[in-house]
Amino acid sequence: NISGQKIGRLVVLYPTDKRDYKGTVIWHCQCRCGREVDISYDRLIYGNYVSCGCRKKEQQTAFTGSLTFVDSTCLELLEKRKYRQDNSSGFRGVVQRKNGSYSVNIGFKKKRYYLGTYETYKEAVNVRLRAEEMIHDGFLRACQRMNTDGETAGNLVFEIKKGDGFLEIESSDAEENGHRIEF
């Protein structure tokens, strides 16, 4: 019985008659903010829930307020690209296929661009690095130049044109416009 226990911002009030898909008891809880929620025993005990959701909203608001977005792209996150924990190949944007070859893609401005399939890991990583240099680093350089020139990066045009076997930059920044990667 966990009635009365405090878990994060939640106070566990009583068990309900409901069960989750695994048959675990659903508990009725009250959050510090006053909202009441029903949460399974597993999620309460194993730390999946510590509030009704208000804590997550607060954190997102605080985090988002400190970031710089240009055309729906976060500059700070682009500058500090990290490897995803669930990446099985060891390099971002490179996925090993069942036949042993490597598929490569890159994301930019909420779009994903396929860069081909390669026989060796080294080839795949090389293509991905060239694409990052052209797209991600090019975008950051263009934003930095605009801010240095006194313009706002919000006026920047930086689009990716995909053709048969290539990606090309179309940009209002003259130094980045026309850059091309073939794959």
Image: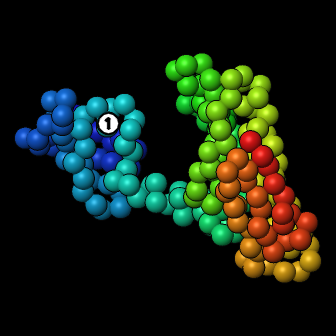
- Mark 1 surroundings: few (<14), some (14-19) or many (≥20) residues within 10 A: few
Q: Secondary structure at mark 1?
A: helix
Quadrant of the image occupied by residue 12: top left
The N terminus lies in quadrant: top left
Q: Position of residue 110 (x, y in %)?
A: 57, 58
Quadrant of the image occupied by residue 18: top left
- Residue 32, compared with residue 72, is above or below; it is above
Residue name at image x 15 percent, y 43 percent: 14
| Residue linked to disc 1 | 43
The C terminus lies in quadrant: top right
Nearest to the observer: residue 105 or residue 39: 105
From the viewer's perspective, is 23 left or right of 159? left
Q: Residue furthest front?
A: 164
Nearest to the observer: residue 85 or residue 51: 85
Q: Position of residue 130 (x, y in %)?
A: 81, 43
Quadrant of the image occupied by residue 39: top left
Residue name at image x 15 percent, y 30 percent: 23
From the viewer's perspective, is 157 left or right of 16? right
Residue name at image x 63 percent, y 28 percent: 102
The amino acid beneath tag 1 is Arg
From the viewer's perspective, is 167 left or right of 89? right
From the viewer's perspective, is 61 left or right of 77? left
